[in-house]
């Protein structure tokens, strides 16, 4: 093993064990995905030629290209997932604001306050 492998493998094994312990306590699926990612990293770092062998089987030239393509696909999936969660949270915030507005109505002066605030900020400049 080279110096890179000696440095990274213990860290990755600690991450794997941490994810496994946490998965056993709460059974959340995303922990299995993380465990799979860390385990794959351990295997590919220990056996770098394995990526080239799998890449050749898939018709990809180099193992590094396979790893890069996998990274691009997984990053895209994560971005779509995060966008969906953000969209859902926005909807929840709007629903919460509407519910709170209906729960605590009070008489206001409508847009008069907003117009006054804009005009006063223009005068200050």
Image (cartoon, rainbow, N blue to C red):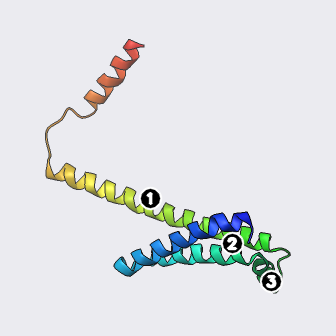
Badge 1 crowding class, 10 Å Cα cut-off, few under 14, some 14 to 19, many 20 or more, is few
Location of residue 108 in the rendering, given as x and y in whole percent from the top left corner: 18, 35
Residue sitting at x 49%, y 62%: 82
Helix or strand or loop: what does disc 3 sit on?
helix
Location of residue 38 in the rendering, given as x and y in whole percent from the top left corner: 58, 73
Q: Which residue is mark 3?
A: 53
Precedes in sequence: disc 1 or disc 2: 2
- Vertical placement of 72 versus 96: above or below? below
Residue sitting at x 76%, y 81%: 50
Position of 59 with respect to 94 (left or right) is right
Question: Do residues under tags 3 and 2 come within 8 Å of each other at their CB atoms?
Answer: no
Helix or strand or loop: what does disc 2 sit on?
helix
Q: Which residue is mark 1?
A: 86
Precedes in sequence: disc 3 or disc 1: 3
Q: Quadrant of residue 85?
A: bottom left
Label 3 – label 1 distance at C-alpha: 39 Å
Precedes in sequence: disc 3 or disc 2: 3
Q: How many marks?
A: 3
Position of 111 with respect to 21 (left or right) is left
Q: Which residue is mark 2?
A: 70
């Amino acid at each position: 093993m080279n110096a890179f492998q000696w440095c990274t493998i213990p860290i990755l094994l600690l991450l794997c064990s941490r994810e496994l312990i946490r998965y056993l306590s709460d059974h959340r699926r995303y922990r299995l995905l993380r465990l799979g990612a860390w385990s794959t990293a351990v295997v590919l770092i220990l056996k770098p030629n394995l990526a080239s062998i799998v890449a050749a089987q898939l018709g990809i030239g180099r193992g590094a290209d396979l790893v890069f393509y996998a990274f691009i696909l997984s990053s895209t999936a994560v971005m779509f997932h995060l966008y969906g969660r953000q969209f859902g949270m926005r909807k929840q915030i709007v629903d919460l604001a509407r519910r709170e507005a209906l729960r605590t109505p009070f008489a206001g002066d409508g847009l008069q306050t907003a117009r006054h605030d804009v005009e006063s900020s223009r005068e200050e400049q």
